[in-house]
């Protein structure tokens, strides 16, 4: 069948004397489908919504099988001791295994399986350079269900975004009819599938020996982003099977702390489940060879990377320091140094790193000797680390530079060089020491900078932690900002988004406040010159940064940089806003995490104004990055630009595809910030109501 289109056919027992093969039915012989053929929108009551082939040699090349439906094998149903080859960018997508009649629903043990493909009865299936995606498998096998099949080989193939109750990507069941061997090779990927159990792959064996059901993952293949919703085995669920990850290609340089780059490595990372985020094994053999990766998976209850259950299991794990990739723990960026018990050790135990009843933290290294438990959860992680924090301050107590923070294990030495600040001398050029092995604890050290003699010169250009505005702003209420004309001060993107949940950079914040300056204040302070080494004269934000720097509203870093593209923190934003009001209310506030912080005063003023607020645990979290939505909300509060409900806006305003939920907390602030409009205050209210849209200023003309 060459470049054919088979569509909208139905195999119904009563009408057509057949219930199989909605689009194509083949029994015996050979079936070839190629050259951009499309099999779509077909239905079979029983087997093979798109194609049903029994004891047939099947070859599918460069074709599409999509949007077909049946009870078994929504897209393709192939059985018999023969072979099926799917190659050349074939796509099997959007097919569904589902109940087709009410009688099927009422029949015990009859459940829909194999959303994309059903294969079995000793069949050998090869999928090469092709994709199985977006299929729904009902009870088993969202992408593929393999019942008593022989070889299933994925060769540079992708199984993605499929869904079923068991085996979101693949469900394989091995019985006495045939041994089942699944191989992933040459960069094959099983990703983003979902199931209650075995989101990526579920392989189950009904026989006594584990050698009858084998899963081998090699040659750069990977399982990632699969999610077992409240169940077992995010990447893999294995029952009485043998799982081999990698090919034991030992790298002679795979020791020490360096990353291992191995293009032939296999990886199981970033999968999720309740038990066994990476792998859940019941009475299974699990073998992880060196130079492969099993880490940064997540489990809600136990075993982030591995959970094994059953006394007859055999677990062989490579040294965690000899896995491939950067081997950095996603939660803290630290290097992985070993395997640790996580939530289960022949019974429930603490999670890795969690605080125990005695106030200590749980870091229990995995052992393989005779004392080892038989049932356990594991996580590739590191031993307990202790934080060394070095604060840098001027002699008056103000912040001189960002604190240095490193993590060090017990008994290890550390050494941190203090940053050079022109015109100042540090009392410790290097901070060094050792975390005591017997009584380890976090360590906090302060390095103090004192001003060096200028030798009679003219000021030296040293760091000024709290610069003052060069122009007096006479109206305390106006703050030097235009809170009368409600121009749009945030510009969205060409794709119709405003990206409210993204972080915002220091340059973007400078541009916002520059645009909001009263015209007279902006003109009096305007400059295109600055002393920052990383703010070029042709940068789009040069005038904004230069002008606000001259006014003393923004400051750079001791190394002479401004870092325009760095995300801005809550503390930095509060400090900028507050510098428009030097005489603000400094009555202490209840935030527990700003005491001694370099921006404590500015945060206090901003909180007393009602511009910023904290969290329910009485923290402000000054170092958290601020989002674009939070920025707009804060600026609107500073300027008293406060619509109360969506009814206060206008129907012909500019809207954004990612700000369409009117119930979202940031819906009104974003619309206020991105639309120029006239307004009037509602009676006896601080809230405004828009009356008419107005012209949007061309901010590029400001320089």
Image: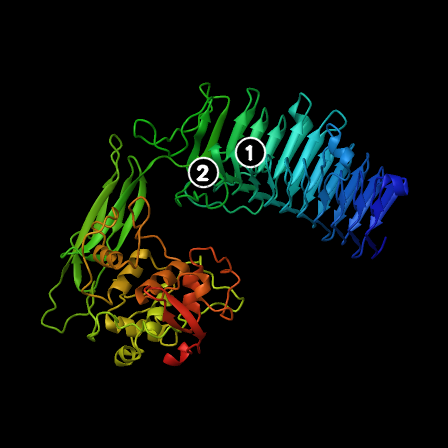
In the picture, measured across the screen, residue 567 lies left or right of residue 263, that is: left
Residue at image position (56%, 22%) is 310
Residue under circle 2? 321
In the picture, measured across the screen, residue 418 lies left or right of residue 44, that is: left
Residue under circle 1? 231
Displayed quadrant of residue 668: bottom left
Between disc 2 and disc 1, the foreground one is 1
Displayed quadrant of residue 482: bottom left
Rendering coords of residue 538 (x, y %): 39, 76
Which of these two is toward me, 78 or 49?
49
Residue 458 seen in render = yes
Which of these two is toward me, 31 or 162?
162
Mark 1 or mark 2, which is nearer the start of the sequence? Answer: 1
Q: Residues within 10 Å of mark 2 (few under 14, many from 20)?
A: many
Q: Residues within 10 Å of mark 1 (few under 14, many from 20)?
A: many
SS label for mark 1:
loop
Which of these two is toward me, 564 or 420?
564
Q: Is residue 548 above or below residue 262?
A: below
Rendering coords of residue 315 (x, y %): 54, 27
Q: Are marks 2 and 1 in contact (CB under 8 Å)?
A: no
Q: Count up the numbered dots.
A: 2
Which of these two is toward me, 476 or 322?
476
Residue 29 seen in render = no
Displayed quadrant of residue 98: top right
Q: How is the image coloured?
A: rainbow
SS label for mark 2:
helix
Question: Distance of mark 2 from mark 1, alpha carbons?
Answer: 29 Å
Quadrant housing the C terminus = bottom left
């Amino acid at each position: 069948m060459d470049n054919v289109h088979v569509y909208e056919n139905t195999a119904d027992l009563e009408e057509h004397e057949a219930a199989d093969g909605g689009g194509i039915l083949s029994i015996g012989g050979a079936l070839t489908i190629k050259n951009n053929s499309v099999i779509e929108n077909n239905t079979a009551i029983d087997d093979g919504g798109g194609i049903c082939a029994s004891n047939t040699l099947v070859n599918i090349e460069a074709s599409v099988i999509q949007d077909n439906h049946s009870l078994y094998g929504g897209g393709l149903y192939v059985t018999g001791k023969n072979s099926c080859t799917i190659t050349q960018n074939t796509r099997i997508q959007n097919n569904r295994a589902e109940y087709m009649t009410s009688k099927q629903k009422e029949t015990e043990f009859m459940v829909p399986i194999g959303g994309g493909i059903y294969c079995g009865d000793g069949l050998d299936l090869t999928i090469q350079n092709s994709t199985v995606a977006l299929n729904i498998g009902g009870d088993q096998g969202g992408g593929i269900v393999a019942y008593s099949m022989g070889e299933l080989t994925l060769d540079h193939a992708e199984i993605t975004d499929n869904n079923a109750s068991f085996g979101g990507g693949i469900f394989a069941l091995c019985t006495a009819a045939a041994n089942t061997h699944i191989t992933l090779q040459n960069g094959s990927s099983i990703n983003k599938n979902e199931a209650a159990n075995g989101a990526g792959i579920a392989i189950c064996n009904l026989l006594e020996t584990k050698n009858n059901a084998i899963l081998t993952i090699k040659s750069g293949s990977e399982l990632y982003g699969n999610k077992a919703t409240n169940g077992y085995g995010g990447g893999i669920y294995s029952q009485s099977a043998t799982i081999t990850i990698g090919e034991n290609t030992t790298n002679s340089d795979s020791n020490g702390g360096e990353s291992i780059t191995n293009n032939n490595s296999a990886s199981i990372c970033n999968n999720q489940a309740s038990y066994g985020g990476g792998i859940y094994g019941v009475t299974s053999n699990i073998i992880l060879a060196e130079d492969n990766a099993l880490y940064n998976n997540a489990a809600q209850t136990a075993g982030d990377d591995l959970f094994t259950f059953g006394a007859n299991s055999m677990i062989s794990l490579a040294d965690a320091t000899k896995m491939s990739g950067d081997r950095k723990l996603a939660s803290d960026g630290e290097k992985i140094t070993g395997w640790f018990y996580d939530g289960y050790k022949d019974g429930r135990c603490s999670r890795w790193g969690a605080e125990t009843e005695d106030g200590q933290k749980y870091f229990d290294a995995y052992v393989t000797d005779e004392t080892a438990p038989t049932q356990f959860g594991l996580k590739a992680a590191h031993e307990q680390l202790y934080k060394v924090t070095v604060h840098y301050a001027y002699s008056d107590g103000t912040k001189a530079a960002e604190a240095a923070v490193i993590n060090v294990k017990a008994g290890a030495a550390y050494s941190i060089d203090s940053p050079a600040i022109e015109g100042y001398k540090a009392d410790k050029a290097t901070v060094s020491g050792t975390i005591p092995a017997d009584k380890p604890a976090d360590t906090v050290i302060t390095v103090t900078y004192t001003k060096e003699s200028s030798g009679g010169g003219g000021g030296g250009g040293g760091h000024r932690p709290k610069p003052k505005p060069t122009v007096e702003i006479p109206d305390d209420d106006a703050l030097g900002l235009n809170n009368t004309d409600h121009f749009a001060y945030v510009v969205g993107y060409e794709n119709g988004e405003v990206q409210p949940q993204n972080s915002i950079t220091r340059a973007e914040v400078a541009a916002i406040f520059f645009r909001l300056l009263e015209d007279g204040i902006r003109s009096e302070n305007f400059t295109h010159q600055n002393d920052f080494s990383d703010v070029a004269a042709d940068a789009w934000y040069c005038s904004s940064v230069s002008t606000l720097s001259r006014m003393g509203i923004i400051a750079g870093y001791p190394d002479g940089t401004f870092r325009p593209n760095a995300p801005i923190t809550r503390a930095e934003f509060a400090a900028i806003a507050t510098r428009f009001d030097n005489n603000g209310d400094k009555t202490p506030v209840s935030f527990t995490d700003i005491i001694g912080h370099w921006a404590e005063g500015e945060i206090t003023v901003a909180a007393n104004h009602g511009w910023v607020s904290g969290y329910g645990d009485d923290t402000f979290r000054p170092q958290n990055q601020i989002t674009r939505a939070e920025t707009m909300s804060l600026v609107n509060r500073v300027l008293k630009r406060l619509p109360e409900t969506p009814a206060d806006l206008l129907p012909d305003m500019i809207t954004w595809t990612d700000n369409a939920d009117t119930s979202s907390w940031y819906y009104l602030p974003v619309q206020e910030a991105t639309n120029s409009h006239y307004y009037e205050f509602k009676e006896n209210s601080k809230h405004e109501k828009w009356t008419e849209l107005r012209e949007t200023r061309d901010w590029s003309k400001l320089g």
